[in-house]
Amino acid sequence: MIEVKNLKKIFEKEKFLRKEKITVLKGISFKVDREVFGFIGPNGAGKTTTIKIIMDFIKPTSGEVRVFGKNINEVKEKVGFLPERPFIYSSIKGIEYLQFCCDVYGIPYFERKKKISKLLELVDLVGAEEKTISSYSKGMVQRLLFASTLINDPDLLILDEPMSGLDPIGRSIIANVIKDLKSQGKTVFYSSHIIQDVERLSDRVAVIIDGEIKLCDSVSSIVSKYLKGYLITFKENMQLKTEEVKKDHLWMELEKLKSMKCEIVSVEPLRLSLEDIFVKLVKGEGIESSSNSKANS
Amino acid sequence: MKVLPIAKLTAKEVLKEKLFIGVVIVSAIFCVLSYYLSNISAGNNVKIAMDFILSFQFFITAVFAIFMVSGSFHKDLNDKVIYLLYSKPITKVEYLTGKVAGFFSVLTLLSFILFLINTSAILIINKISNLYVPHIILTGRTFIFSLLLTFMGLLLISVVTLFSVSFSSSTLAMLVSFLVFIIGLELSPVKELVTASKLISEVNKIIVKVVTTYFQTFLFLM
């Protein structure tokens, strides 16, 4: 779906009689297939620049981007895009913007009403479409524009911070739509700051820091890779006790408890959340993977 | 072609802005004021009132065209509306053509509304003043003037569009557009001087001729 190869971007900034070069992307590469792909990184890491290059809003210094194996301008009919901090003319009505999108994609008049009401229902904006956008809250504008990205039934959705500035209900609406798209076999590529949402929704994630991809893998394998150990809960002399053990010592410990005639109540994996891994990567702290972790027992 | 949807969106956006409604209200107020101005002046009341009204229409149309175009482009670029539009299957040429078409349709509508307001005001002043000026002459003059203003508006829209997409600052685009507009108004004596002078080279004479041809509409109105 999206193939990014060795993408570099250097911005030139004028500074009193000299030009300063700022390297924003240092040759990043990744591939997005039919999946929900989360793109995370701290502010200024290069997320929005990458998305702008993918959308062909700005040209890369070097490298290549292919969408559906082609230049994005040839396949824009199949792509939906939501920019960061979306804004649209405040003097028009919500329905007028959706009608404009229908005009652009050449959706026939007889299909429009049904399509628009379905989308408004999806983003919980029924009844607000006849109001001018100036009367909308920030979250409502975001949801309206999110609905407009789905109007052409895109195969690929590129979303730049779709959840930022939304209240928990708005976030849950967008998250549900993303889940729904995933079940339909669509591709969603999105950047976000909200790691819990990324962990919950994404099949795979890429972590970008200082213009470099530090980690790119499936959420489940990242989380299991950084497994610290296990927490065993057991009953001994009618008393409930817990014990933390290293990953390698699990079976040995279980055998020991069995021989002591203890009743094992539960065994829970102790792992770092995606957020912990992300924070450690941003801070430049090394992360101990499961193979060399030390469990506290 | 995605020109029509862009033109429709631009027209809807501009028509609902305060600037458009403000221009119509100010023009109507000026029509009332022109009656009092013509009363305190010596001479043909109807002619004086008409001159006031048409001069004001000329000025307000130019100001509206410059502010409308540079304001709209500024909003598209600064608020990143452009990203939202370019993410759809719209080319840069379609975007610019659609924008210009939208601006021109709004300007045509404004000229028509101002024509109706001005003609009504002039006919009322004509009736109050008890001076006989045939209605067809008054209506004809305001109509032709409105047509010329619409064409001048189109030229101005194209000039401001060019500057708005060339300059990053909307204030700079507006200033340069005003300057070009004023230069266009003052080209008549320049052309006469240049064509009469023997000191000016043929190349420069051609340049001046090309420029004056482009700004011919401004000169018509002088």
Image (spheres, coloured by chain):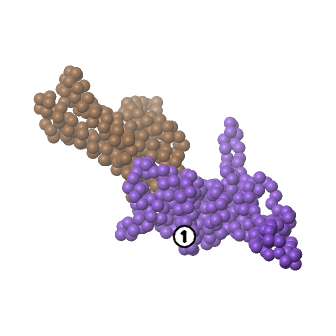
Front residue of this view, candidates A268 and B57? A268
What residue is at 43 percent from the left and 51 percent from the top? Answer: A133
Residue B103 x/y as whole percent: 38, 48
B35 relative position to B13: left or right: left
Say whether residue A170 is visible: yes
- Secondary structure of residue under mark 1: helix
Query: What's the residue type where badge 1 is placed?
Result: Asp
Say whether residue B3 is visible: no
Subunit ID for the residue under disc 1: A
A59 relative position to A6: left or right: left
Q: Would you identify the image quadrant in which residue B208 lies?
A: top left
Residue B220 x/y as whole percent: 31, 38
Residue A33 x/y as whole percent: 63, 71
Q: Is residue B126 above or below residue A211?
A: above
What residue is at 53 percent from the left and 46 percent from the top? Answer: B78
Q: How many marks?
A: 1
Crowd around label 1: few <14 · some 14–19 · many ≥20 (10 Å): few
Front residue of this view, candidates B193 and A151? A151
Front residue of this view, candidates A22 and A19? A22
Image colour assigned to chain B: brown
Q: What residue is shown with label 1?
A: A180
What residue is at 70 percent from the left and 67 percent from the top? Answer: A219
* Chain identifier, colour purple: A
Q: Is residue A275 above or below residue B106?
A: below
Residue A151 x/y as whole percent: 46, 65
A266 relative position to B49: left or right: right
